[in-house]
Image (spheres, rainbow, N blue to C red):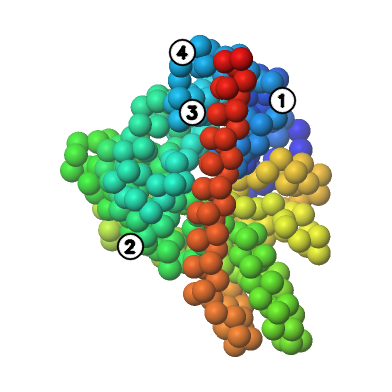
Amino acid sequence: MSTNLAALSQAGVSIWLDDLSRERITSGNLAELIRDKHVVGVTTNPTIFAGALSDGEAYDEQVRELADRGADVHAAVRELTTTDVRNAADAFRDVYTATDGVDGRVSIEVDPGLARNTDQTVAEAADLWKAVDRPNVLVKIPATEEGLPAITKTLAQGISVNVTLIFSVERYRAVIDAYFAGLEQAKANGHDLSSIHSVASFFVSRVDSEIDKRLEAIGTDEALGLRGEAAIANARLAYAAYEELLASDRWRALEAEGANPQRPLWASTGVKSPDYSDTRYVDGLVVSGTVNTMPESTLEAAADHANVTGDTVSGTAEQAQAVFDKLSAAGIDITDVFVTLENDGVDKFDKSWSELLETVSGQLQKAKG
């Protein structure tokens, strides 16, 4: 067992794997990660599923069965992905029980093509929740403007939600508001608030990638000196917003009714630039009550050489804001950065979903002979 990952877990950070495949489940690898690497949850997205379904033969038998039944490509994708999520949820059931439902969570995302359609997102979220039929699933809904009311309406049905594609602190505040509203409506609808869980997936490395590119285009010494500073500062400001809203009377009223806090989740923690430490977004974001969802390469790097020395987030808001003040002074349009990142994020997942449909369509045709 990794002492570094043990230290991270003991610091109050839940370690989730940002990857899932049929082979990972059936080979026993997922069980091994749970047992030996302190992994207590899994996140998926269309890109992950597209990669899993195009690699190897693990899905061939189920694809043949679906082809024999005459399933169309959308039904096939639904069955293939929900089967993986259901089986992964079963693998995490002991973790789920041991943590009273806080961890042991597996996420599945609504069709990203619905990211700009509130009502269809709500309907898809409910369908996924029923299809997986496990209490430890989280349905992922993007934090687009159209996604915010969908988050509230989905939570109001008693469905646990992973809010994804959050880039700005401003949008994160709106996500927390949507969570509070969802809980209030769920209570009015007669749901037990203690059974509803949520995480807010705040994306990290993509912020550095986008801002570093712009700083390099500006090219001044001042601009170049700010490379690699934005992402962790942004996440630390998000955590300060989280602490502020948890101190509100509105939250205290919900908490008194048994509500669980919507934990911040650090997403996109795989380091994109070779200039930075590959555990940068682990070491710099250690704070109790959060989740860090890592691709396997980052998990292995953290196991080998993460520098976990205690809380690196609490009390850093003033320093983090100073970074953004300097970025603005250097000529970075912060608002445009976040708009670009959200649009790119939706487009990337939509493209991966199309690739997933294309892959499964080809597999169905091949199975039919």
Q: Earlier in the sequence, mark 2 or mark 3?
A: 3
**Quadrant of the frame with the N terminus:** top right
Q: Earlier in the sequence, mark 2 or mark 1?
A: 1
Of labels 2 and 1, the one closer to you: 1
Asked if marks 2 and 1 touch (Cβ < 8 Å), the reply is no
Q: Which mark is residue 73?
A: 3
Of labels 3 and 1, the one closer to you: 3
Q: Earlier in the sequence, mark 4 or mark 2?
A: 4
Residue found farthest to the front: 369
Q: Is residue 207 above or below residue 181?
A: below
**Which three-letter amino acid code belongs to the residue tagged 3?**
Val
Say which quarter of the image contains residue 317: bottom right
Residue occupying the point 27% across, 38% down: 157
How far across and down, in percent of the image, does residue 337 sit?
55, 71
How far across and down, in percent of the image, does residue 30 sit?
66, 27
Q: Which mark is residue 56?
A: 1
Residue occupying the point 36% across, 37% down: 124
Residue occupying the point 54% across, 41% down: 354
Report helix, strand or loop for mark 4.
Answer: loop
Cα distance between the residues tagged 4 and 3: 12 Å
Q: Which mark is residue 248?
A: 2
Cα distance between the residues tagged 2 and 1: 50 Å
Res. 164 visible in picture: yes
Q: Which mark is residue 69?
A: 4
**Which three-letter amino acid code belongs to the residue tagged 1?**
Gly
Say which quarter of the image contains residue 204: bottom right
Report helix, strand or loop for mark 2.
Answer: loop
Asked if marks 4 and 1 touch (Cβ < 8 Å), the reply is no
Asked if marks 4 and 3 touch (Cβ < 8 Å), the reply is no
Cα distance between the residues tagged 4 and 2: 53 Å
Report helix, strand or loop for mark 1.
Answer: loop
